[in-house]
Image (cartoon, helix red, strand yellow):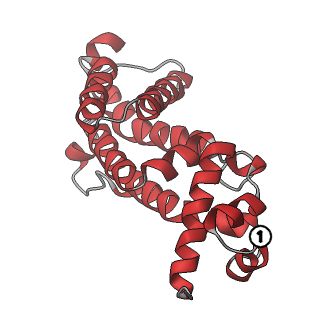
């Protein structure tokens, strides 16, 4: 039986996802991907010129959606709304939507992308959340007379929040449990945050 080109490409992509999940970008083998897809190695290279191109084909949709979420959620012209820390919850919910759609690819992106152009994704995520917190939290604190003496604390909060989210995503398969844990994590970090910074 002769396979349609799109079907062959999809088999290669599915085999690649399994290989990247198991071995990571650096140790993934194009030969193993070809074998698991049931195609000749040369055929894989007809679709993707190298491992980098294949990895990018899989990761780009996840990465693009996550970056869009982090840049777009909560943007508004209303200054009062813009500084609400609750937008962090919106960001987490949007990250969850991407995770729901691309759970395996998401885990590969955060844990198995060393050596690729995505290897600093977790740090990018931390920096973006840090910037959102600085835009939303610091002005609110300033207006009510709370001074953040060292803004490194904002990075620490963003870093520990992201690491907490990633621990949940790595260790839970049940979507209801993930949402509950994410909600508890956000309450832990942001409930009465103004009082805790006084």
Task: Identify which residue, 71 or 29, lies in the foreground.
Answer: 29
At x 35% / y 19%, what residue is drawn?
146
At x 62% / y 67%, what residue is drawn?
37
Task: Identify which residue, 105 or 126, lies in the foreground.
Answer: 105
Element type at marker 1? loop
Q: Point out residue 182 in the picture as x, y percentages from the top left corner.
A: 31, 30
Residue 198 appears in view: no
Q: Is residue 168 left or right of residue 10?
A: left
Task: Identify which residue, 94 or 143, lies in the foreground.
Answer: 94
From this viewpoint, which residue is outermost toward the front? 1
Please tell me whether residue 127 is drawn above or below residue 6 in the rendered image: above
| 10 Å crowding of disc 1: few (<14), some (14-19), many (20+) | few
At x 54% / y 63%, what residue is drawn?
14
Q: Quadrant of the C terminus?
A: top left
Q: Point out residue 73 in the picture as x, y percentages from the top left corner.
A: 32, 53
Q: Is residue 8 left or right of residue 165?
A: right
Q: Which residue is labeled 1 in the image?
A: 50
At x 29% / y 26%, what residue is drawn?
181
């Amino acid at each position: 039986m002769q396979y349609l080109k799109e079907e062959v490409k999809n088999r290669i992509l599915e085999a690649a996802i399994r290989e990247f999940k198991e071995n990571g970008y650096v140790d993934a083998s194009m030969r193993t991907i070809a074998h698991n897809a049931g195609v000749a190695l040369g055929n894989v290279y007809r679709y993707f010129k190298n491992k980098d191109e294949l990895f990018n084909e899989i990761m780009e949709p996840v990465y693009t959606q996550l970056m869009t979420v982090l840049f777009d959620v909560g943007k508004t012209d209303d200054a009062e709304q813009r500084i609400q820390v609750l937008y962090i919850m919106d960001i987490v919910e949007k990250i969850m939507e991407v995770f729901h759609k691309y759970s395996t690819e998401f885990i590969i992106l955060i844990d198995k992308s060393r050596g690729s152009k995505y290897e600093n994704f977790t740090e990018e995520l931390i920096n973006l959340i840090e910037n959102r917190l600085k835009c939303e939290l610091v002005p609110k604190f300033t207006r009510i007379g709370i001074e953040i003496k060292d803004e490194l604390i904002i990075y620490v909060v963003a870093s520990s929040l992201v690491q907490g989210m990633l621990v949940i995503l790595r260790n839970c398969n049940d979507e209801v449990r993930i949402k509950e844990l994410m909600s508890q994590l956000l309450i832990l970090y942001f409930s009465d945050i103004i009082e805790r910074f006084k």
